[in-house]
Image: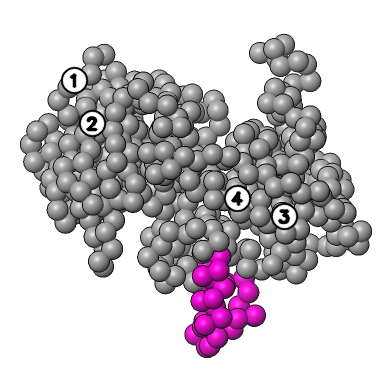
Amino acid sequence: MDIDTTPVLQLTGICKRFAGIVALNGVSLSVRAGEVMALIGENGAGKSTLVKTLTGIYQPDEGAIALNGQPVAFASVQDAIRAGITAVHQETVMFDELTVAENIYVGRQPCRGARIDWKLIEAEAEKLFARLEVSLPVRARVKDLSVAQRHFVEIARALSQDARVVILDEPTASLSQREIQELYRIIAQLRAAGTAVIFISHKFDEIFTVADRYTVLRDGQFIAEGAMAEITEPELVALMVGRSVRNAYPKASVTPGDTLLEVRNLCHPTEFHDISFSLREGEILGFYGLVGAGRSEVMQALFGLTTGVSGTMTMHGKPVRIDSPADAIAHGIAYVPEDRQHQGAHLTLPILHNITLPILSRVGFFLRGRRAQEIAIARRYAEQLELKAHNLCQHVSELSGGNQQKVVLGKWLATDPRVMILDEPTKGIDIGSKAAVHRFISELVAKGLSVILVSSELPEVMGLADRIVVMHQGRIENEYARNAATPELIVAAASGCALPLEECA
């Protein structure tokens, strides 16, 4: 459909400060009906603060918001929803024990007399999914849904509220390729229905696929806007970071040493089978596979998080047994999990205490002394990882996703490990932060640390790893040396395809 030239949503000169810190400084933005506008910026650029301002969580200190040319002010999330603005976040917030239909209409259930009309709720929910062309049982408990299905429930909830503006905040971070294509189709439906979409993603292929226009923020300020068709990826990167980001995968020239870790016949009754591999000193060993291949489950077993595992492990040729994370840490193994918010960090604690938490026995409990040593350790890793924060006492929950990931990295690096397992270390973080993490990984192996890198991003694995192990349905399908790996070979193996790739289509 033709895009209306009148903005359905317009922000002008938005400013937001927190205790003297300027989070947004004169930001302007507009999005039209039937348009997908990509909101782009590094972690810490102000995107999250702007979204919270749009959805009534924060109120701007200066500036104006207009809907269809009329000034509006949101004192609460409910105000924004009533005005037709809703957000679908990367980490969905729903009531797990309630059904799909109940979550869509929670807090505004239609009633028949004094009773809630459950039949009407379910019927209306079914109409919403029919409109989206999504097959989802409305009586299913949300706790039993996949990440993609949770996103679809949130989009259905937005449609049920006659949303004029839908904000999609990193919606594909945990989706398979098939689920991403399904989301693209739904975005096209929203566009065709005249809904304005603000799309936030760090993946440029997605941005160039779905967006009509872009708005770039940097350090809390508006930098540029324009049509996606009139800009290139390098130009967009330069706008985001204020510089050209070259050599995104700075692989250090390191000759791996002796075998450090050897895993043989690792098995779990339901997750993976017959996993065998070795890891050398100063080596980056990549693990690649599609969603559900079992990569994360293997890494959790290596770190002692999984029970019922059989098989053997040796370090420097000596047998080791790891039944708990404490055992793993004692043997010099650290694990940075994919789910940083639930498994990697204590969000309600400051950066300072998060980084030193695994090594309290060395620095002393923070309430009882040696605070200077704790601060020195935390500052060291914050500086090395280019952490963006007001200070080391800031709570991790207040940081952007990329900076939360850096805190988790610093936390485990502080244990002085010999083996660092990185499970999707750059998931959901911007290109500038990715480059910083990649540089740091390269520096670690240059110092002799061994790294197991689990990633769903093929360029990342191929750019950093010395060898690549490819998994499919809980088994190792193949292994490739760096100079022998090609995208076609890796994707074919990850798909369980032994034939040439063109014959697998």
Q: CA distance from mark 3 to mark 4?
A: 11 Å
Q: CA distance from mark 1 to mark 3?
A: 54 Å
Q: CA distance from mark 2 to mark 1?
A: 10 Å
Q: Which numbered circle lies on residue 439?
A: 4
Label 4, residues with CA under 10 Å away: few <14, some 14-19, many ≥20: many
Which residue reaches farthest top? 503
Which residue reaches farthest right? 317
Q: Which numbered circle lies on residue 446?
A: 3
Q: Which numbered circle lies on residue 31?
A: 2
Give the percent coordinates (x, y) of residue 158: 29, 35
Asked if residue 379 is positioned above or below residue 187 in the image, the reply reads below
Quarter of the image for residue 214 reads: top left
Q: Is residue 362 left or right of residue 321?
A: left
Label 1, residues with CA under 10 Å away: few <14, some 14-19, many ≥20: few
Q: CA distance from mark 4 to mark 2?
A: 36 Å
Q: Is residue 339 magenta?
A: no
Q: CA distance from mark 3 to mark 2?
A: 47 Å
Asked if residue 58 is positioned above or below residue 151 in the image, the reply reads below
Label 2, residues with CA under 10 Å away: few <14, some 14-19, many ≥20: many
Give the percent coordinates (x, y) of residue 391: 40, 69
Which residue reaches farthest bottom? 368
